[in-house]
């Protein structure tokens, strides 16, 4: 696993010990970042279920101003902090349950990555995304990584599905926060 583009291009990342996380492939990350590059520059990024931090670190490498990494798994937190230290672009780690973080956070984000374990049911993912919406700026991008074969959430108030792509056994859904009226 490595940073694909930007100032930290080709820098290696370590993954957590064990099989509790499943990082997005380089090909999938490259495709996503190619499609959201304008949104990433000078953005505040939220990386939920951060694992190794590959998504948020990729965003920082490509010009994001700030990244907040939310993770609760101890092994993942060790790898995440090692990667942040190694890459040297900053970022803040929040060792917390995603739901608890979303309920107490007062920050606003321009880009959010949501990459829960595949075992997290779609209903729980929809609840997470619903709680995320108030923390997003108008026009914010939300990228969700799931197992191929699942249908994206039908309706989450404030979010519009703008893209859905398959990469082998995985799906990438991209949403945009609607303008508030």
Image: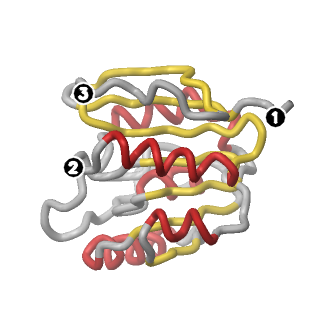
Query: Are the residues at dot 2 and dot 3 in contact (C-beta closer than 8 Å)?
Result: no
- Residue 40 bears which disc, if any? none
Name the residue carrying label 1: 180
Q: Earlier in the sequence, mark 2 or mark 3?
A: 2
Q: Height in image: 17 above or below 43? A: below
Residue at image location 56% in from the left, 26% down from the top: 35
Q: Residue at x 31, y 22 (%)?
A: 166
Q: Which residue is mark 3?
A: 148
Q: Given this view, does label 1 or label 3 mark the residue nearer the observer?
A: 1
Mark 1 / mark 3, whichever is N-terminal: 3
Q: Position of residue 160 (x, y in %)?
A: 60, 25
- The quarter of the picture where residue 83 lies is bottom left
Residue at point 40% right, 27% down?
A: 152
Few, some or many residues within 10 Å of mark 2 (<14, 14–19, 20+): few
Contact flag, marks 2 and 1 (Cβ < 8 Å): no
Q: CA distance from mark 2 to mark 1?
A: 33 Å
**Tag 2, which secondary structure?**
loop
> Where is residue 136 drawn, in percent x and y?
69, 48
- Picture disc at residue 119: 2
Q: In the rendered image, which quarter is residue 13 located in?
A: bottom left
> Residue 163: x percent and y percent?
50, 20
- Asked which quadrant contains residue 53, the reply is bottom left
- What is the distance, in whole Å, between disc 2 and disc 3 at their CAs? 13 Å
Q: Quadrant of the C terminus?
A: top right
| Spatial CA span between label 1 and label 3 | 31 Å
Mark 3 falls on what kind of element?
loop
Mark found first going from the N terminus, 2 or 1: 2
Q: Position of residue 15 (x, y in %)?
A: 26, 63
Q: Tell me: residue 70, above or below residue 61.
A: below
């Amino acid at each position: 696993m490595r940073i694909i583009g930007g100032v930290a291009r080709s820098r290696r990342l370590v993954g957590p010990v064990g099989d509790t996380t499943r990082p997005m492939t380089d090909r999938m990350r490259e495709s996503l970042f190619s499609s959201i590059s304008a949104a990433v520059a000078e953005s505040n990024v939220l990386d939920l279920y951060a694992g190794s931090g590959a998504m948020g670190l990729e965003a920082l490498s490509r010009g994001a101003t700030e990244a907040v990494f939310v993770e609760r798994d101890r092994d993942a937190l060790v790898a995440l902090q090692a990667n942040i230290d190694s890459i040297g672009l900053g970022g803040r780690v929040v060792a917390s349950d995603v739901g608890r973080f979303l309920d107490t956070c007062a920050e606003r984000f321009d880009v959010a990555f949501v990459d829960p374990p595949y075992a997290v049911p779609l209903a729980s993912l929809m609840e997470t995304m619903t709680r995320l919406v108030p923390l997003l700026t108008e026009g914010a991008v939300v990228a969700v990584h799931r197992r191929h074969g699942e249908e994206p959430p039908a309706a989450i108030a404030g979010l519009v599905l703008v893209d859905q792509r398959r990469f082998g056994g995985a799906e990438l859904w991209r949403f945009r926060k609607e303008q508030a009226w």
